[in-house]
Image (cartoon, grey):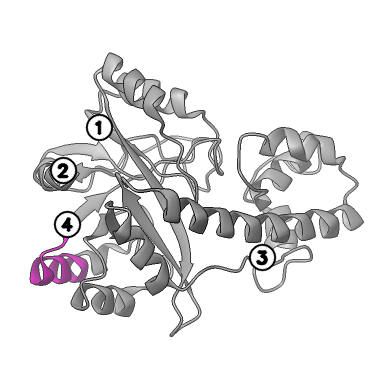
């Protein structure tokens, strides 16, 4: 497979602000992510694992030693009450984390419950030892379906993560082993996010059909920005996202949604970036 890098912003690309590690469903450690950013000559990178804060003081210090500014962040999983669809919030640089941590813990408990149910259902069809699953999930605060799939690959039942077996087991409508995770209301989660002192950005509006939600959140002052440059945003919708951002004074960010090997597409770190002038605006808020 040939990996084609796509740096969409027309101005100078600067920071990859959407990255996952082994602390959720990525394939590299947080430290490896920072080393990779340095190897890719990225001035800044954000660590945004699902529903957990992965970038501590040690990681920031490592970034400083390598010439990479590390932005602590989190991708909060929520639900739009109007549509019932998922909505993800990227939160950068939270300063007060007690209430935010409690929210993340609540989501992780729900994900763990769903993960246990999915593992039990999977074992009815494919006998995989829990020990193999736990090895793949040991870094994360909850059990993801990706961890179960990695165990199935280790056991020889599949050779790709997102292939026929993943669809057979975990398709949200027809999967034999699928169990839904209960997510908090997006508006309530954003109250917590803003109270943390961080910068809240609506992630990849195209992915979950969040175009109307973007307009609502922007008009109500509930978000600080929108993720414009993302591999699953539809190119024809980017002007709409930019227009909403300009009309409401929102930041415009970009990120690869980097997962390393745990991905459907070959996307190296830095494939989708935040332009330098937008990074400067974010850095001022941080």
Q: Secondary structure at mark 3?
A: loop
- Specify which label sits upstream in the sequence, 4 or 2: 4
Q: Residues within 10 Å of mark 2 (few under 14, many from 20)?
A: many
Q: Is residue 206 visible?
A: no
- Specify which label sits upstream in the sequence, 2 or 3: 3
Q: Which residues are magenta?
A: 239-251
CA separation, marks 4 and 2?
9 Å
In the rendered view of the protein, which quadrant contains the C terminus? top left
CA separation, marks 4 and 1?
16 Å
Q: Secondary structure at mark 4?
A: strand
CA separation, marks 1 and 3?
35 Å
List the residue tagged with mark 1. 44
Q: Determine the residue located farthest toward the top in the rendered image.
A: 65
Check whether the beta carbons of the residues at disc 1 and disc 2 lie within 8 A of each other.
Answer: yes
- Specify which label sits upstream in the sequence, 4 or 1: 1
Location of residue 83 in the rendering, given as x and y in whole percent from the top left corner: 46, 83
Q: Residue at x 43, y 56 (%)?
A: 99
Towards the viewer: 125 or 201: 201
Q: Residue at x 77, y 62 (%)?
A: 177
List the residue tagged with mark 2. 279
Towards the viewer: 51 or 208: 51
List the residue tagged with mark 4. 251
- Specify which label sits upstream in the sequence, 1 or 2: 1
Vertical placement of 208 versus 58: above or below?
below
The majority secondary structure of the magenta stretch comes to helix
Location of residue 118 in the rendering, given as x and y in whole percent from the top left corner: 76, 58
CA separation, marks 1 and 2?
9 Å
Nearer to us: label 1 or label 3: 1
């Amino acid at each position: 497979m040939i990996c084609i890098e796509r740096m969409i912003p027309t101005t100078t690309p600067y920071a990859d602000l959407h990255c996952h590690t082994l602390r959720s469903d990525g394939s590299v450690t947080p430290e490896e992510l920072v080393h990779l950013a340095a190897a890719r000559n990225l001035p800044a990178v954000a660590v945004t694992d699902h529903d957990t804060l992965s970038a501590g003081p040690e990681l920031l210090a490592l970034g400083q030693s390598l010439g990479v500014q590390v932005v602590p962040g989190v991708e909060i999983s929520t639900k739009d009450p109007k549509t019932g669809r998922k909505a993800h919030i990227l939160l950068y640089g939270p300063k007060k984390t007690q209430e935010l941590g409690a929210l993340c813990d609540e989501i992780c408990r729900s994900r763990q419950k769903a993960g246990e149910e999915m593992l039990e259902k999977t074992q009815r069809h494919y006998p995989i030892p829990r020990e193999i699953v736990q090895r793949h999930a040991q870094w994360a605060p909850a059990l993801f379906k990706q961890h179960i799939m990695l165990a199935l690959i280790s056991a020889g039942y599949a050779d790709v993560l997102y292939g026929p077996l993943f669809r057979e087991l975990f398709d949200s409508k027809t999967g034999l082993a699928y169990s839904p995770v209960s997510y908090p209301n997006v508006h309530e989660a954003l109250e917590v996010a803003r109270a943390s002192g961080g910068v809240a950005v609506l992630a990849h509006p195209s992915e979950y059909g969040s175009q109307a939600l973007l307009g609502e959140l922007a008009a109500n002052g509930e978000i600080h920005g929108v993720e414009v440059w993302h591999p699953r945003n539809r190119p024809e919708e980017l002007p709409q996202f930019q227009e909403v951002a300009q009309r409401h004074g929102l930041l415009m960010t970009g990120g690869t949604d980097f997962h390393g090997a745990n991905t459907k597409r070959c996307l190296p770190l830095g494939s989708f970036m935040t332009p330098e002038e937008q990074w400067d605006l974010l850095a001022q808020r941080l």
